[in-house]
Amino acid sequence: MNFFKQWGSFMMEGAKAHAQWEIQISTNILGSRKRVVLLLMLLVPIILGGMVFAEQMGSAIPDLLGGHKAYSPAFYSTGIFIVSILIGLGAGLITGCIGAGGGFIIAPALMSAGIKGILAVGTDLFHIFAKAIMGSIIHRKLGNVSVPLAVVFLLGAILGATAGGIINRVLYEFNPVLSDTFITTIYALMLGFLGFYSMYDFLKARKSSDTGDAHGGGGHGGKAEGAELGGLPRKLQSVNIPPMVKFDFDFTPGGRSISWVFLVLSGALVGLAAGIMGVGGGFLTFPIFVYMLGVSSMTTVGTDIFQIVFTAGYASISQYAIYGFIFYTLAMGMLLGSLLGIQIGAMVTKVVPGITIRGFYAMAVLAGFVNRFFALPAKLGEMGVIKISKGMGATLDTIGIWAFFIVIGGFGIWVIGTFLKNIGQLKGEGEHV
């Protein structure tokens, strides 16, 4: 039981680190006139070409890039673009306000809106990569990146991302319903674990605050996880399969070392998750590095951010874009919405109690779990795995969709309403910064 608690704690830390990275990226983009101009230029093909020359552009783009079917503004419609902005806005509000990555809602939201799972995954990866590139992702302040550690880890991540992309494409070519079912199941498992842990974490923090424990609701132990080695990291670091990769010289005289084998295997697992789910993989990097490999939390954050850029870029282009599984219109809409949402959410944290924010995060993750869990019966029934009427399957799916969008939409309305209600106070704080 203690293992699952620690694993959940480290997953939360990974989500927080990823959120801080996204906030920095959003600030970098919107704070630079050149980057804002670049963003507007990326939107021109959608706003103009998509409406005026959609058919011509679709037929002119090679089939290798998906043609009219996916990778072009040819699939443009006002409704699709608005929905993508709203999805990005919701994810951005969660990231900025809660301080934990909100990207977990993107693929479920796209699938609930009728987008095929494989297209949702590829589009999400491309959106992450585009945001990272525009925001100068290799941040100047990332002094905690261990380059040897990151490079060896990336070798595995690229292998894993390739495998994830192949799995998704093979399943889709064999049976599109099987592909959607597979992606839905993976999301249900991940969101279920993280959702129930975050709710447990919230209830524990609220109980601590009710009993007057000022330290019970903050963080996870107040120390840098990984600074002290546990039993498993000691065993793995004692395995001598050369070459050994050294790191964490700031924590231990002479640093620590671990065999390249464990780094490649860890990278492969993270890359596989990124390739299959369309996420950065940070929710896995943190617990694997800290809990299993014994890497300090500071080095883990830097390495995680480093790998996200290359893993997302490689997977989105080599495993999805060239096969037509990226919806450019959706990706740009989500990018626009998330940049705005992150800024609003980050400002709202100045006027909202932290315990309230943690409660909303738990609800949001559980809403994503309910959404994917309730979508499974209809898909399994369509494949003949279980016996369920189409009407019942559709009803459960609809319940999951409504529950998801009510929670995420309600959260978004609350955050924006709080922002508008306190805009005077927030503006005053901004002027004094």
Image (spheres, rainbow, N blue to C red):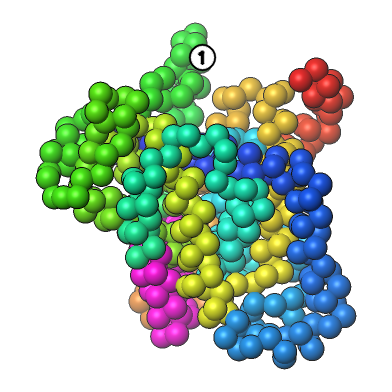
Query: In the image, is residue 70 above or below residue 348?
Result: below
The answer to whether residue 63 of the structure is visible from this angle is yes
Quarter of the image where the N terminus is located: top left
Q: Position of residue 25 (x, y in %)?
A: 64, 44
Magenta stretch: dominant SS? Answer: helix
Residue at 77% across / 57% down in the picture? 38
The x, y position of residue 119, in whole percent, is 56, 72
> Is label 1 in a helix, a strand or a loop?
helix
Residue 109 visible (yes or no): no
Amino acid type, mark 1: Asp
Instruction: Write the residue at 23% across / 51% down.
Output: 260
Q: Residue furthest top?
A: 212
Q: Residue at x 32, y 32 (%)?
A: 248
Verify whether residue 162 appears in magenta. yes
Q: Quadrant of residue 252?
A: top left
Q: Residues within 10 Å of mark 1 (few under 14, many from 20)?
A: few
Where does the C terminus fall, quadrant-wise? top right
Q: Which residues are magenta?
A: 160-189
Left or right of 321, for residue 348: right
Label 1, on which residue? Answer: 210
- The part of the image, by quadrant, that contains residue 155 is bottom left
Q: Position of residue 73 (x, y in %)?
A: 74, 76
For residue 269, side relative to residue 218 (left or right) = left
Q: Based on the picture, tell me whether residue 217 belongs to the magenta stretch.
A: no
User: What residue do we see at 57% from left, 38% from top?
Assistant: 140
Give the answer, above or below, for where 179 lies relative to 367: below
Q: Is residue 213 above or below residue 187?
A: above
Q: Nearer the viewer, residue 217 or 219?
A: 219
Vertical arrangement, residue 182 with respect to residue 14, above or below:
below
* Foreground pick, 221 / 108: 221
The percent coordinates of residue 90 (x first, y second) are: 67, 49
| Foreground pick, 60 / 389 | 60
